[in-house]
Amino acid sequence: MTWFPGGTGSFSYLNNQGRSLSFPRYTSVALASIANGALLASSPSLGGNLYISNAALKVGTTAKPNACAAINPQNQAAPSPLTSANDCNVGTRWQFIELGGDYDVTYINLYSIPLSINQGSTSSAGNLTPQQLTTLQGYLGDLTGGVQVYPANSQHTTRFVRDIAPANGGDAIGSFPSFSTYIAAAFNSSGLATENISNQYSGNTPATGKTICSGAAFAAQNYSTSSVKYLGNTLTITGNGTVAGNFTLTGMVPAANPPAGCGNPIGPTQCYKQTVTPTDLSNAFYTAVLSYSITGPAAKACNATGNTVESNGANDVFAVAVRDFLVGFASGFVGSTVTAPPPPLSPPNPPASTYGMMTSQQWSNSAAKLFTGVQPSSTLAKPSYNPWGALVFDYFGSSVYGFQYSDYFSGPLGNPLLVVQPSIPLQLVIMNDQPPQKH
C-alpha cells in the first residue's frame, strides 16, 4: 500500500509486533506487515490517493540501467499506466482509491486490481464473482483488440497486469472505437444537434491557475444553451447564464507544435487551434476534457484582451455547460429515441418524450438508463456512447466511481460516491479475480 497525500491528515497502523506506527507518506508498506490490514485515519476528510499494488512501487525509468529505486518521500512520483512511459512499475498491478470526505474507486485511468469499499451496510460495488471479473477483463481488452492491455493481447490468456483506459489520451486513445459515426448522425446539415442543455450551477470559488474568469462566472445560477453547433470542424456552444449573461464557447484543441509557455487548463490562444476534427471531438468524449474560448459579458470582465483559452477543469458556469455537452454524447443521450422516464421530473423542466429530448438536468436527476439502455442499436464498431464506461457500468453499476461523469448522476442510477461516516470502520476489499482459461 502506498499513500500519496493530497491534503491534511495522517494514517497510522499496528505492525505484526503490536507497535503503533505512522503510515509513511510516499512509501510502500507491505499489507502483510500491517496487523489485520488495518489503517487508522486521523480524519474522514483525509485527502490523497491510496495505491494498492502487488509489489512495492518504484521511481525511475526502465530506459536507464539500474535507475529504478524504491519510492520514498525524497524521490517520489505516481506510477504511469502507460507502457510507453518506461515507468519502473510497468510490470506491477496497481489500482488506487481517492480519499477526501467521500471515497471512490476509480477505473477511469486503468483497470488492474478490482476493488470495492464498504462501510456498514453500504457497499461501493456488488459482490462480483471471479468469473465475472475475468469476463470483464476480456471485454475491456477487446475494445482495443488487446493493444492497450499489458502484456499485449493477454486479456484471454492470463491475468493481465493492466488495461489502459481511453481517458489517458495520448497513444492509448487512438486504439479505441471512434465516435465519428455518432457525431455525423447527431448534427444535421446545418451543423445543429438536438442536445437540450439546461441545468443549475451551484457556484464555486475560482481556483488560481485554472480559470480565466471570476465573479459572475462562479456565481450560483441557472444556465442553458440555445445552440450546439458543429460545422466545418468548428464547434460552438451558445447559451446564457442567469448571472453571467449570454455567452458563446468555441471549441479548441492544443496546437500540434505549441510555443513555449503553453499549459493546461488555461493558456494563450496561440497554444490552441480552432479546428476541432471528429477525432478531436471523439477524444474529448473519452477524456472528459475540452478547451474553449469564451465571448460574452462575463468573459470580458476577466479576460479583457480576449486571448486566453480555458478547459472545463475551470469549474465555472461555462465549464459545467461544456461538461453537460460531453456527458450527453459519452452517455448516449443525444439522439436517443428511447422513451424517457415518466414524471415526476425536476421542475421547472416539462416531461420529455424520449431521452434525446430530456434536459441535461433531467439526465442528472431522472435518468434510469445509460449507454445501451438509451442507444440499444449502438455497436462496438460504431459506438453511440463511451464503450469503456458502458462495460464498467454493466458490471459495477453506479455504486462505484468507475467511469467519467458517473458522479454526474444522482437519481434512479444512484450515487457512485461513498460518503465516509466518522468512527465507522471502512472496509477496502480486494476482489478475488482469477486468470482466464487459456484457449
Image (tube, rainbow, N blue to C red):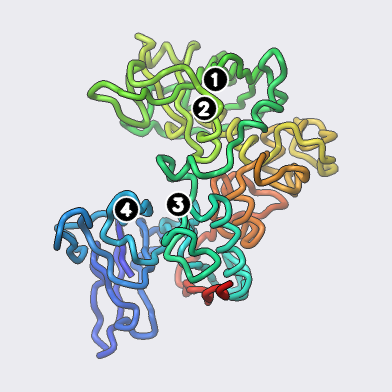
The picture places residue 40, in percent across and down from the top left corner, at: 35, 73
The picture places residue 375, in percent across and down from the top left corner, at: 75, 42
Amino acid at the residue labelled 3: Asn
Q: Is 353 situated above or below 32?
A: above
Mark before the other along the chain sequence, 1 or 4: 4
Q: Which residue is mark 1?
A: 243
Horizontal side of 209 relative to 116 (left or right) equals left
Give the label on residue 6, or none. Answer: 4
Q: Which residue is mark 3?
A: 109
Crowd band around label 2 with a 10 angstrom C-alpha radius: few (<14), some (14–19), many (20+): many
Crowd band around label 3 with a 10 angstrom C-alpha radius: few (<14), some (14–19), many (20+): many
Tell me what residue is drawn at x 70 percent, y 45 percent: 379
Q: CA distance from mark 3 to mark 4?
A: 18 Å
The picture places residue 430, in percent across and down from the top left corner, at: 48, 73
Name the residue nearer the viewer: 218 or 160: 160
Amino acid at the residue labelled 2: Val
Tell me what residue is drawn at x 36 percent, y 34 percent: 207
Crowd band around label 4 with a 10 angstrom C-alpha radius: few (<14), some (14–19), many (20+): few
The N terminus: image quadrant: bottom left
The C terminus: image quadrant: bottom right
Residue 239 in sight here = no
Mark before the other along the chain sequence, 1 or 3: 3
Q: Are marks 1 and 2 in contact (CB under 8 Å)?
A: yes
Mark 2 vs mark 3: in front: 3
Tell me what residue is drawn at x 54 percent, y 55 percent: 402
Amino acid at the residue labelled 1: Val
Crowd band around label 1 with a 10 angstrom C-alpha radius: few (<14), some (14–19), many (20+): some
Q: CA distance from mark 1 to mark 2?
A: 9 Å
Name the residue nearer the viewer: 117 or 206: 117
